[in-house]
Image (cartoon, rainbow, N blue to C red):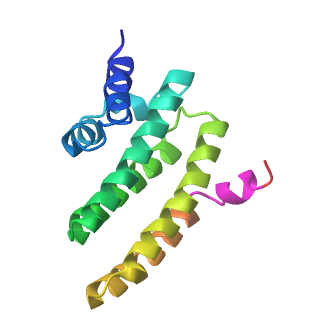
Amino acid sequence: MTEISYWLDGIKIWFQPNQSQNIEILIDHVNLVPSTLFENVDSDMNSEALAYWFDACQRLSLYYQDQGDPEKAFSYLQFAYAKLQGMICHPSHRDDIKRWSLKKIDRMIIVMMEFCQVQQENKWQQESIQLINLHVTFMKDQNNLNLVYRND
């Protein structure tokens, strides 16, 4: 059993009925994800694990938002966004992996913007502006790869 398959089996436990109440399982699996997951996504198992990991980040964000901790909620969105940036920039990833990552990062920035917009504190509005600026800079540095992949 590989490190990723072991990790995948563990996170699937949380998604089983009556297990989703134990948020610690999800926290541990998001924070202790094998780094190789983001470097080698060529197998169906790795793709499945990646999907679980991104879903878990979003679920943790929602959990902490419900708990009244927007900083921690936002940090899980940022974590997922940063991993996507790394996947896009990874030199050995195939075009289809980069395309998937670009599509996912487009959705992720919207989720992050919406998160900032519903927060009451003024600092979140500033965060929203900064997100836009940083995202535009990142995408510009990708030499319009997102435009190349749009029609696929």
Q: Toward the viewer: 93 or 46?
A: 46
The N terminus lies in quadrant = top left
Please indicate, yes or no, whether residue 36 appears anywhere in the rendered image: yes
Q: Residue at x 64, y 46 (%)?
A: 99
Looking at the image, the residue that sits furthest to the bottom is 122
Position of residue 54 measured from the top left corner of the image (x, y, whole percent): 43, 46
Position of residue 79 measured from the top left corner of the image (x, y, whole percent): 33, 53
Q: Toward the viewer: 111 or 64?
A: 64
Q: Is residue 148 left or right of residue 58?
A: right
Position of residue 43 measured from the top left corner of the image (x, y, whole percent): 55, 21
Residue 12 sits inside the magenta stretch: no
Position of residue 135 measured from the top left corner of the image (x, y, whole percent): 48, 68
Q: Residue at x 36, y 59 (%)?
A: 77
Segment tinted magenta in the rendering: 141-150
Q: Toward the viewer: 13 or 32?
A: 13
Q: Is residue 14 left or right of residue 114?
A: left
